[in-house]
Image (cartoon, rainbow, N blue to C red):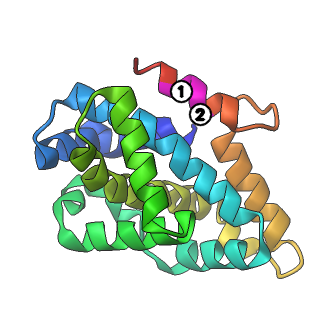
């Protein structure tokens, strides 16, 4: 299952309902927004994986971040600590608040939702994305099996597989295709 599907299915769909409730929007609008925001988050993850420092930071976050709680307990999405954690994740993924603002503006333009709503949603989606990666990593027991020599290729391969649902070696077409399903 790819990242977008995992995010939409999180908590049996309760995560989408929780986000919609938190932001005062419909579940359909929340789904569309997630469909627009998740490709940018996935690109940020892939960009971060392209350097050994970024990959190491991602490994550390997946091993110790306890991000799975954002998928397992949708009520966590309403907490300020989730927004703080999500903003920290975005800082690592995008490098600056300007990039986050541009991602929110682009998603707002494509969905017709208010930019302010997108800015509030983006950290929640980032936290859920890390939860999704963390859950997939834990499920495969990859973090416990990797050695220093194979960690880069092993994690990179697992994440690429997670982000590349049609196994063509590119996640861009998969993410765009998934996002189009919601419009």
**Badge 2, how many Cα within 10 Å: few under 14, some, many 20+?**
many
Q: Quadrant of the N terminus?
A: top right
Which of these two is toward me, 92 or 1? Answer: 92
Q: Quadrant of the C terminus?
A: top left
> Is 178 contained in the magenta span?
yes
The residues colored magenta run 175-179
Q: How many marks?
A: 2
Q: What secondary structure is marked by label 1?
A: helix
Residue highlighted by disc 1:
178
On the question of residue 131 being in view, the answer is: no
On the question of residue 41 being in view, the answer is: yes
Q: Position of residue 44 (x, y in %)?
A: 59, 56
**Badge 1, how many Cα within 10 Å: few under 14, some, many 20+?**
many
Is 83 situated left or right of 42 in this image?
left
Q: Main secondary structure of the magenta part?
A: helix
In the depicted structure, whether residue 59 falls above or below residue 163 = below
Q: Quadrant of residue 145?
A: bottom right
Q: Position of residue 152 (x, y in %)?
A: 81, 69
Rounded to the nearest angstrom, the CA distance separating label 2 from label 1 is 5 Å
Q: Residue at position x 39%, y 37% from top? A: 107
Q: Residue at position x 44%, y 43% from top? A: 37
Is 2 situated left or right of 88 in this image?
right
Q: Quadrant of residue 168?
A: top right
Q: Position of residue 45 (x, y in %)?
A: 61, 58
Is 174 situated left or right of 157 in this image?
left
In the depicted structure, whether residue 68 falls above or below residue 161 = below
Residue highlighted by disc 2:
175
Is 152 situated left or right of 43 in this image?
right
Q: What secondary structure is marked by label 2?
A: helix
Q: Residue at position x 24%, y 58% from top? A: 77
* Label 2–label 1 contact, CB within 8 A: yes
């Amino acid at each position: 299952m790819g990242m977008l599907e995992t995010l939409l299915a999180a908590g049996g769909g309760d995560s989408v309902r929780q986000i919609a409730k938190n932001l005062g929007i419909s579940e359909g609008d929340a789904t569309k927004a997630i469909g627009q925001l998740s490709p940018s988050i996935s690109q940020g993850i892939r960009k971060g994986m392209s350097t050994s420092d970024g990959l190491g930071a991602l490994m550390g976050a997946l091993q110790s971040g306890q991000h799975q709680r954002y998928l397992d307990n949708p009520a966590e999405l309403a907490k300020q600590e989730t927004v703080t954690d999500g903003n920290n994740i975005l800082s690592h993924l995008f490098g600056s608040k300007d990039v986050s603002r541009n991602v929110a503006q682009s998603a707002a333009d494509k969905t017709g939702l208010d930019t302010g709503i997108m800015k509030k949603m983006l950290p929640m989606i980032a936290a859920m994305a890390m939860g999704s990666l963390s859950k997939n990593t834990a499920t495969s027991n990859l973090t416990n099996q990797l050695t220093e020599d194979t960690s880069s290729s092993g994690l990179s391969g697992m994440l690429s597989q997670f982000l590349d649902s049609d196994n063509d070696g590119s996640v861009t077409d998969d993410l765009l295709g998934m996002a189009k399903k919601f419009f």
